Amino acid sequence: MPAAPPRARPSSASSPRPCPLRVLPTPRPRGPPRPGLSLLLLPAAMWGRRRYGAGLGGRGAEELRARRREREAALRKARRQEQLVSKRLLREDTTAEEGGQDGAEIMPDPLSEDEVLELLRGVQSGSEDRKRSLSCLRWALRNKETQQKFVRLEGSIRTLIGLFTSSLADMQMEAARCLHELSHSSDPAVAEACLPVTSYLLTYLSGHSIEFTELCLYTLGNLVVESEAVRKQLLPQGIIPVLASCIQSPHEAVLEGLGYVLSQLLQAKEAPTEIIPLVLDSVLPQHMLRLVCSGLKAGIGAAVEFAWCLHYIICSHTANTALLSLGALPALTSLLLDLASEIPEDAPEGLELLICPVLRCLSNLLAEETGCEVQIQDERLLIALFLILQCFLQQHPFIVQECLWLLNNLTADEHFFCSALLSLDLLPALLQLLPCSQMASMLVLTILCNIAEKGPAYCQQLHQQPALPLLLPTLALPDPKVVGQCLELLHLLFLHWPEAAADFVRQGGHQALEQHQSTPELQERARALLDIIGQPLGASAFSPCHAMLSAFS
Amino acid sequence: MLSLPPGLRHRLREGPPLPPVPPLPPVPPVSRAPPPSSAPPPSSAPPPSSAPPPSSAPPPSSAPPPSSAPPFAFAPRRLRLGPHHPLLEDGDVHRHLYLQGVLTSLAEVAEKPKVSEFSCHISGCCQAFDTLEGYEHHYNTLHRNVCSFCKRSFPSGHLLDIHILEWHDSLFQIMAEKQNMYKCLVEGCAEKFKSSKDRKDHLVTVHLYPADFRFDRPKKVKSGPKHVSSPRKQGGSMLMDVSMETSEQFQVDPMEIGPSENMEIPQPAASPGPSVPEERLYKSRIPSTICFGQGATRGFKGPRKKV
């Protein structure tokens, strides 16, 4: 059983910020309501219809930061073990429930076994109190211990399922919320107790109630990551065809939930062999692409989910021919240009959550060896990349390596982007990224090597930038990999543009190289470079018409 | 803060891509030919430990990049990363923080529009609501996919269609004697079966459905020549269908394809409803909170409206 990251109990929620609403009068419809009625009444907020998961809130900012650091550490650890799994929690936002002046969310205390049993009996009875018992149960089930006690009671899940499948609409909704709480549990025993409900969850996905469908989707998405056994049940139950029908819904909330389910499915270990082929066989890929690319207009929440779905498919490297033939490369390029032109003024919060997977998809698609060389030749892509870097560098530094990876793939083979980078005068900005992080240094140096490798004209421009004043300090960094990459770059520079070697020496390069003569992974290259620059002083290596040389002799 | 040259944003927004900048001439490095713009330097002796020149100078336009000679190993290549690559770690962590609801951008919640209480306007339905979602869900559960023959409601149009076919289509019974007519309920599965039981077995063994799946209860057929379909006008045979069902119907929720055998949720005791015609034989079994659409007439009066 994979270790799920710990789900800390929700601490507090911020009080809702007023959002622009479209206020409607009391409806007095004549005929049957139009199916899309609820959608029209949603406030025009990006993601805001529900609060997901444990929100942050009014408690001290320091406590929040500490909590976030904890979560981050746990996620990192899980990721390194290749067991990164998260669930999403959908909660009603009724301020009455949340209580507290500062919007602090209250976690109920665990109930005793007897209390849980009493609630269950109340729910099973035919009395008028049944509705109230069910609401109490839903509240109580926020507590993990109560969840565990509940699922252990005989007949408890069967009762919930009975209510969930009844046609008493409000009871059905409450039962659905109870099941959703259970599905979110970090205790595998609790989540797996919900398995008998999956066939019904799938049946209800073809229904029309937006809120109910959304709830079913998130419950399903939580169960999907629980274990391979669950997925082995869901696949034969027809989850993929159902999702393929559902993706044609016009409702953003439904689409976002759907994207969530798919993203959970696609992260499964067995996805490349068991799930991705089924997805590719359906209409899902073209709709996913469509929904990602229309995200800025139609719904960012859904676009984010489907972008991650595409990333999971593409990085499995089993599907890329199919996606390329759907036109993924030009479509996603165009999207990136649009995204970059939105920032920073009109940028919605969280745009990096969409940009990141789109960058990854582009990078991996470009790296696909399909025989026919895939290319985009649009220099605006470079502009977009640097605008994105500029916007997110400070707040979300992880974007740096994502952008640089794409930049590497663009500059590796083709001269086009190397030239464009120079002619757009983006080299200084690239060099500014050198000290960001170890990973950034490696990538920047690799990209510079890509450029230098293209020949003398490129090296000349690099040198005139000037690049050397930045490369010299890089040689003093402690990381041998970074230094090694720097040596490769210097080699290319000196190879194509010997003048650079003279300047290098003048700027103290000799000493900078000497310090590496005894480092195992660097010594050969350091010595080779020392040989190159340590030519006998006859100016034979150097062009006499360069004025700088007067200083040399 | 990254400093960029001015005018970039403008270039980005200003429409179609500019004609590609012609790439700088890729002069093969090994020949050590000077770039055209500068004066030719004296030829330089290649440093001892660098790469020996290749045997032939490759033509400029299609020159493959000469591979670096040892100890230098660099060759440009496009990177292909798998899902667990370290470069992707930070971004993945960020994505999961978002899923767990930890990112600040998601702490804001939009307020739901407030509406004053109103009631369902389907005639005969008396339910009241104070939220639009509640109303929507009620409508979809009870009034949307309703069989106009027997007033049962279904979770989807798909199941409703199957129900109508199997319960109310006399032709279906005839054809079912000759060929497999019972469709699998799972979307995407095209299998058909000769009996309801065979279908259920298929659902359980192939699709791992529960054996007591609520929306697959077999229709109980009473024996007797009365129920053999003969060419009559549809209204007549429907009357028979409805009457046949009266004894089993509505002890339970109307959402089944067929009546259920054991009811796990006891229905609330029916309160005396508004006065109804005598013909409603089973009014006492209808829960008070359930209202049926389309006028909800039943029994021997027959349905108001045909499908």
Image (cartoon, coloured by chain):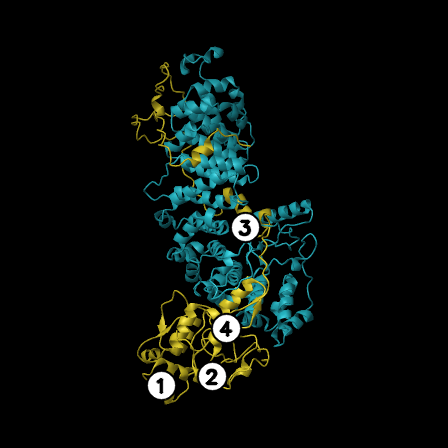
Mark 3 neighbour density, 10 Å: few (under 14) some (14–19) many (20 or more): some
Instruction: State the separation of the CA atoms marked 4 and 3.
Output: 36 Å
A82 vs A510, nearest the viewer: A82
Chain A tint as drawn:
cyan
Instruction: State the separation of the CA atoms marked 3 and 2.
Output: 50 Å
At label 1, the amino acid type is: Val
Work out whether mark 1 precedes mark 4 in sequence or the reverse, and give the earlier one: 4
- Residue A61: tell me if it is visible: yes
Instruction: State the separation of the CA atoms marked 1 and 2.
Output: 18 Å
**Helix, strand, or loop for circle 1?**
loop
Q: Chain of mark 4?
A: B
B31 vs B290, nearest the viewer: B290
Q: Same chain, marks 1 and 2? A: yes
Q: Identify the residue under disc 3.
A: A45
The percent coordinates of residue A13 (x first, y second) are 64, 52
Any mark on residue B246, and which? 2
Instruction: State the separation of the CA atoms marked 3 and 1.
Output: 59 Å
Q: Identify the residue under disc 4.
A: B123
Q: Which chain is yellow?
A: B
